[in-house]
Image (cartoon, grey):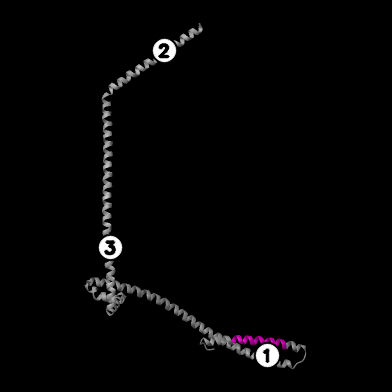
Amino acid sequence: MIEKVECGGANKEEEKERTDRSSNQFNQISMASKVEESNGGEGKGSENWVEDLQRTVIESKDSAIRSARSLHQNSSSRLRSLQDHVPQALSLFRTYEDSFFNKIKEELMIAREHPVEVVGVAVTAGFLLMRGPRRFLFRHTFGRFQSEEARFLKTEKNVKELNLSVDLMKNESRKLLERASLAEKDMKHGHTELMDAGSQIQRLAKSIYKVETQVAGLMDGLREIPGRDALKLRAEVATMASALKKHKSVLDKRIMKISELGIPV
């Protein structure tokens, strides 16, 4: 009994669900029909808009295809025209090239046949390339066509440039003269000092000569005295005499150098 009751309840629930589904579907269909009825005019407008869009796309596509074909045809025609003109240009270039080299050959033949005229032209060209003759020729030809004011302005400019150059040379010469004066003073001072030094060296050499004379006399006296003490003194005097001799040699060389400089000693 319980199972029958449960089965009956389940069947009722299924029937209820089916009934609800049917009612919902009916409501949806009725709402859709109402929407279609209310939007009937708008649907026709949408269809027209879609057709216009398709027509515009097709026309744009056709226009692009026609433009591409026209561009291809124009480029092909230009390429063919260029290919037609290339041989003509090459032949014209060869013609000019041949005429140029033929002209050079003719000029060389003329120069070989007339060497004197060629030398004259070369010398004239060389003079014209030099700055001095070129300026002289310009002054006496084209310079005469210039106005007086223009020539005056040019001359004034040249005068200013010359004044600037002269000022620079004056400053440089003044500096050089000052340096020369200082060097001259130093030279005179050095000349005087060399003269004094030479005189002092000469006096010292004379004094050394006198001492050497005394040492020689002392050596002679010590040779006459016997004994070890006399021998020691003789050795000391001999060493002293050798040192004086070397020192006198150095002084004599210095005096010779001073004399070679033109300074009297």
Residue in view at x 60 percent, y 88 percent? 205
Q: Amino acid at mark 2?
A: Lys
Q: Nearer the viewer, residue 49 or 102?
A: 102
Q: Which residue is mark 3?
A: 93
Task: In the rendered view, tell whether residue 127 sits above or below residue 225.
Answer: above
N-terminal of the pair, mark 2 or mark 3, is: 2
N-terminal of the pair, mark 1 or mark 3, is: 3
- Left or right, 92 with reference to 210: left
Residue 136: quarter of image: bottom left
Q: In terms of secondary structure, where does tag 2 sit?
A: helix
Q: Which mark is residue 16?
A: 2
Task: In the rendered view, tell whether residue 167 sits above or below residue 66.
Answer: below
Residue in view at x 27 percent, y 59 percent? 89
Residue 240 appears at what percent x and percent y?
A: 68, 86
Residue in view at x 63 percent, y 88 percent? 208
Q: Nearer the viewer, residue 187 or 148?
A: 148
Q: Quadrant of the C terminus?
A: bottom right
* Distance in Å between CA atoms under marks 2 and 1: 166 Å
Q: Amino acid at mark 1?
A: Val
**Residue 245 in magenta stretch:** yes
Type of secondary structure dominating the magenta stretch: helix
Q: Amino acid at mark 3?
A: Phe
* Residue 135 in view (yes/no): no
Residue 2 appears at what percent x and percent y?
A: 51, 7
Q: What residue span does the magenta drawing correspond to? A: 234-251
Residue 213 appears at what percent x and percent y?
A: 65, 92
Residue contact between numbered discs 2 and 1, judged by CB atoms under 8 Å: no
* Distance in Å between CA atoms under marks 1 and 3: 110 Å
